[in-house]
Amino acid sequence: MLVVEASRADFYLVTVFLGGGAAWLSGRAVASTWRGYRQAVVYALLLGCAVRFFHFALFQGTLFSLPHFLTDTAFVLAISTLGFRAERAKQMATRYGWLYRQSGPFGWQRGAPDTQRKDVA
């Protein structure tokens, strides 16, 4: 079973560039409005359908192909998840700075940022 249906360039253009970009932005948009992760998953499934349709409409790919749909949707879901987590980590660190600090690009942890106070007497 091949992951790429027509050519690698088509896969990179439609799935990686267009689908991945839309997934990143939709994941960030869901997180920025404080909605749950489930909504990001629903949007990723819809984007997976759109990516499959673009393969069909632009490059004569198979519209109803379960393996290719699962491949496209899994990639889109992964990128959407990364966008969601990046935005949520930034939100938690900036809006709740007294409770959390950002721990890498996709996470946060309890504890205010370390600030050194120098009391001058």
Image (tube, rainbow, N blue to C red):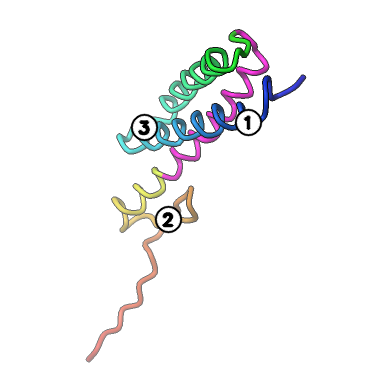
Q: In the depicted view, which residue is nearer to us: 103 or 51?
A: 51
Where residue 39 sits, quadrant-wise, is top left
Give neighbour class at mark 1: few <14, some 14-19, many 20+ (Cα, 10 Å). few
- Residue 114, compared with residue 44, is above or below; it is below
Q: Can you tell which quarter of the image residue 84 is in? A: top left
| Residue at screen point 40% across, 31% down | 26
Judge depth for marks 2 and 1 and give the one in front: 1
**Foreground label between 2 and 3:** 3
Mark 3–mark 1 Cα distance, whole angstroms, equals 30 Å
Q: Which residue is at the far bottom?
A: 121
The crowding category of the residue bearing disc 2, from other C-alpha atoms within 10 Å (few below 14, some 14 to 19, many at least 20), is many
Tag 2 and tag 3, C-beta contact below 8 Å: no
Which kind of residue does numbered mark 1 sit on?
Ala
Amino acid type shown at disc 2: Gln
Mark 2 highlights which residue?
102
How far apart marks 2 and 3 lie (CA) works out to 19 Å
- Reply above or below: 68 against 95: above
Of helix, strand and loop, which one carries label 3?
A: helix
108 or 56, nearer to the observer: 56
Q: Which residues are magenta?
A: 64-86
Callout 2: SS: strand
Rate crowding at label 3 as few (under 14), some (14 to 19) or many (20 or more) other CA atoms within 10 Å: many
What secondary structure is the magenta-colored segment mainly? helix
Q: Relative to residue 90, is residue 30 depicted above or below? A: above
Q: Which residue is mark 1?
A: 9
Based on the picture, tell me whether residue 31 belongs to the magenta stretch. Answer: no
Q: Nearer the viewer, mark 3 or mark 1?
A: 1
Q: Secondary structure at mark 1?
A: helix
Amino acid carrying mark 3 in the image: Val
Residue where numbered disc 3 is placed = 30
Q: Are marks 3 and 1 in contact (CB under 8 Å)?
A: no
* Residue visible at 31% across and 53% down in the picture: 94
